[in-house]
Image (cartoon, helix red, strand yellow):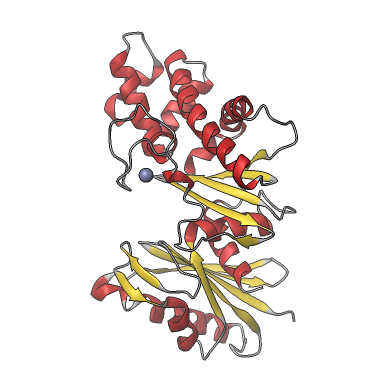
Amino acid sequence: MGMKCIGVDIGGTTVKIGLFETTGELLEKWEVKTRQEEGGIHILPDVAASIREKAMELGLDLKTDFTGAGMGVPGPVLPNGYVEVCVNLGWRDVNPQEELSALLDGMPVKSGNDANVAALGEMWQGGGRGYSDLIMITLGTGVGGGVIIDQKIIAGKHGLGGEIGHVHVRDEEWEHCNCGGVGCVEQVGSATGIAREARRRMAAASEPSLMRSFGDDITAKDVLDAAKEGDALALEVMETVGRYLGLALASASMIVDPEVFVIGGGVSKAGQFLIDIIQKHYEYFTPISQNKAKLVLATLGNDAGIYGAARLVL
Ligand SMILES: [Zn+2]
């Protein structure tokens, strides 16, 4: 029986936990509820109890059968594991990796920001498999990112590494981003951003569009579905979205020159259609060379976090 490792992905409503072979095979995955009350003090004890229970059930010994446990945290994590604040969990001034290690009889525990960790997961067993240098962009409610160079997360000195969602790309923007900035990638490339762009475009134009039947409740998926059917206004929206995402990728390419960009998150369910739109603009902004990062789709979905967390301890 080979050594095992554990991947923990802590989210605001549930904690996902995966048990892996160190070769990368996912053996079991399960979830526990995230108890945010009392400043989130129950979260790690709940996780530890659940891991203990699973280990016992499978006849595994915490001390001898595991290389360790990795953990993705929804906020900035300093290199020593320190978390100043994690608004989604109620955490403030904690070191969750030290705490979880103590709760698991001293098992080695490493942690990282959840978006960075997801990028590592996609490198290990997902769309970026076989590559050592990649950038992942997660197009969800917001836009997350992770930079992996030489198989290592580039978290930065202040935990800001990979925050591609908050790169400024759009000077004409007037509304503020959640980060306080204006014109961030997230404001136009997230699911929320795409829907907002669609509402703006519908209000500014009078032409008929498939998007109009959804009114103000339109979602990014509705926009992408309409664009795929050739709807002119939806295609205009996606051209705007693709332009700014392409610009962000081009800038990233000129700074770290990864082998591949892995595009994930709910919006990426639109598949190759979305990749092609972003790629077109990315090419426009990178005429300097034909030898550069390609764009691929993420393949692990919501499991990227547990894969990447487990990979942290290998
Ligand atoms: Zn921002």
Quadrant of the rendered image containing residue 143: top left
Q: Quadrant of the C terminus?
A: bottom right
Q: Ligand 1 falls in which quarter? A: top left
- Pinpoint residue 37: horizontal percent, then vertical percent: 25, 72
Q: Quadrant of residue 255?
A: top right
Quarter holding the N terminus? bottom right
Q: Does 147 sit above or below residue 37?
A: above
85 left or right of 49 in image:
left
In this rendering, position of residue 168 left or right of residue 273? left
Residue in view at x 62 percent, y 40 percent? 254
Q: Say which of 229 and 242 sits in front.
A: 242
Q: Residue at x 31, y 23 (%)?
A: 200
The answer to whether residue 303 of the structure is visible from this angle is no
Please say if 138 is above or below 273. Answer: below
Count of marks placed on residues? 0
Give coordinates of residue 70: x percent, y percent: 55, 72
Residue at the left extreme, as displayed:
38
> Residue 40, position in %: x, y?
31, 73
* Residue drawn at point x = 48 percent, y = 26 percent: 225
Say whether residue 72 is visible: yes
Kindly indicate the quadrant of the structure image that contains residue 92. Answer: bottom left
Q: Where is residue 151 in the image (x, y as percent from the top left)?
A: 67, 61
17 left or right of 59? left
Is 173 in front, or is 241?
Answer: 173
